[in-house]
Image (cartoon, coloured by chain):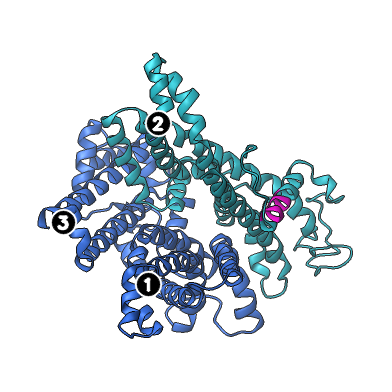
Amino acid sequence: MSGRTRRSWSPATLAAVATLVTIVLAAVWPELLTHRAPDPTDLGATLQPPNGEHLFGTDRLGRDVYSRVVHGARLSLLIGLGATALGLSLGTLLGVFAGAGGRWADGVTMRLIDVLFAVPELLVALLAIAVFGSGTANVVIAIGLASAPSYARLIRSQVLTVRESEFVQAARTVGRHPLHLIVRHVMPNTLGPVLALAAVSAGGAVVAGSALSYLGLGPPPPAPDWGSMLADGQSFLQTAWWLVLFPGLAIAAVVISASVVGRSLRTRST
Amino acid sequence: MIALILRRVLAGVAVMWVAATLTFAALRGVRGDPVAAVLGPGALVTPEVRAQIVSEYGFDQPLVVQYLRWLSRLVSGDLGWSYQLGQPVTEVLRGQLGPTAELAIAATITAVLAAVVLALLTAGRGRTTRSLASMAELSAVSVPTFWLGLVALTFFSFRWQLFPATGAGSLSALILPAVVLAVPVAGVLTQVLREGLETALAQPFALSVRMRGIGPVALIGRHALRHACISLATMTGWVLGSLFGGAVLTETVFARPGLGRVLLSAITSRDLPVVTAVVLLVAAAFTVINLLVDLAYLAIDPRLRRRTA
């Protein structure tokens, strides 16, 4: 990340970064990649297979699948990044509290995290949806909550390592306030592995988000969203394979690229 | 040894207790009207019926009393009443446990078999094989299960008509969902198993086995693989989580009956007793299986026993 790591990026990492950049571009500025709007229906051209006019074909209402995939990037990334940000913040709070708060804080927090680990993440997210209801914001909250324990666990172990290091001891000897120690010295030094985990989990959060909207718990129609596009396409599997192929490829591209980038961040940070 | 087992069991019970408490808090803390939580949102009730429900469920009691009562009902196996389906939650779950267990077990067997074969084929190979394998594993782990299921349906069920698209009960209806559910698990397990194999083969005992004149096949099959299997145990928790999360989606994609489908319809209709029960059931299964795996490894690997004694 800094000047001291002069290893060149592998082709796989470069391809992954390029993919992510394209998808972020689609999310921020979809008009750059398609001139078509995602919503207008064309009942004269429904369920057309991919052709020159419609690169990814059209759906049952004659909407252009390519344009919907491009415009769908925004919601999917928003959900993925929002959930990651929430999970990371909650996880940091819990992790720092456990790692720096002394024996009791550590014991109680870690037992709590053990319990949350005994329930699969998707189930925690579904429980949160059951309590809060469905919809885009609640999907973000649900996935964020579900991912918090794994961040907390990593951050705690990092904090425990860093707080015993010599420079932190030195700062403590100088008489710095504990909070100053945490914010100024401990947290920046836990950043590398945490970012690597966040990159991988952001991909996971995009999948989880699309899974929830596939299950019908996400953004309400007609918003272009990869998960709901898959759910829509399921009724036409027999005739219109392009309806499920392309949105799914988009999701897979995000996750695989995020994992590749996360992996290379991890090897760099250790 | 017995003290150790006892400690693990107690820890498991504690986990279940906290899980139950958290679920109780989630239900009572966030939901406004507890009567609505029993009857479902939008249910119209006369004041008399309302009063009857309130006293029956003890909503007029202090929260602590309600909590203790709920807990004691749970311990006695009473999970409440599903208002959506109009029958006890235990009845609802009993019928759905079978198909989900069947799917999960079939997927586990598929994943473990695939992982063993793939790890044996790729362990200790050259750079190209390894990076191809690692790319394949990454894709297997990353690709969304439900999408894989949809693609599998498109080709194997609709285009080539090899497998039925929906339903449960027959072996041919089980194959596609089990394979789809197994793919991400197999991806992770292959990786773990290969690393385990390579570590085992690099140890001195591998050399001494070879020096006794035992061939490489027997070395891997009879010695290294056993060592490598221990590294699989650490993955149990992840595998279970992935299987259950995947089951919700796989059951929806393939329109199979099961716990996942019940949970999903309970969530959409806000049938909270059922949601709670499924969450607790999964947490319990998780805890029990983890406990059994821990104990099994204490039995298999004497080194662990000595270290923790």
- Between residue A96 and residue B103, name the one nearer to us: A96
Asked if labels 2 and 1 share a chain, the reply is no
Q: With respect to residue B169, does B151 lie above or below? A: above
| Place of residue A240 in the rendered image (x, y in percent of width and height, measured from the top left) | 72, 71
Q: Nearer the viewer, mark 1 or mark 3?
A: 3
Residue B306 placed where, x, y %?
A: 17, 57
Amino acid identity at mark 1: Ile
Residue tagged by mark 3? B5
Query: For residue A56, which quarter of the picture?
Result: bottom right
Name the chain under label 3. Answer: B
- For disc 1, the marked residue is B105
How many neighbours does mark 2 have within 10 angstroms: few (below 14), some (14-19), or many (20 or more)? Answer: few
Q: Give the magenta-colored segment's residue range.
A: A13-20
Q: Amino acid at mark 3?
A: Ile
Q: Would residue A103 appear left or right of A61 to someone viewing this image? A: left
- The CA distance from mark 3 to mark 2 is 36 Å
In the image, the chain rendered in cyan is A
- Residue under numbered circle 2: A165
Q: Is residue A19 magenta?
A: yes
Q: Which chain is blue?
A: B
Task: Find the distance from the CA under tag 1 to the CA under tag 3.
Answer: 26 Å
| Element type where label 2 sits in the image | loop
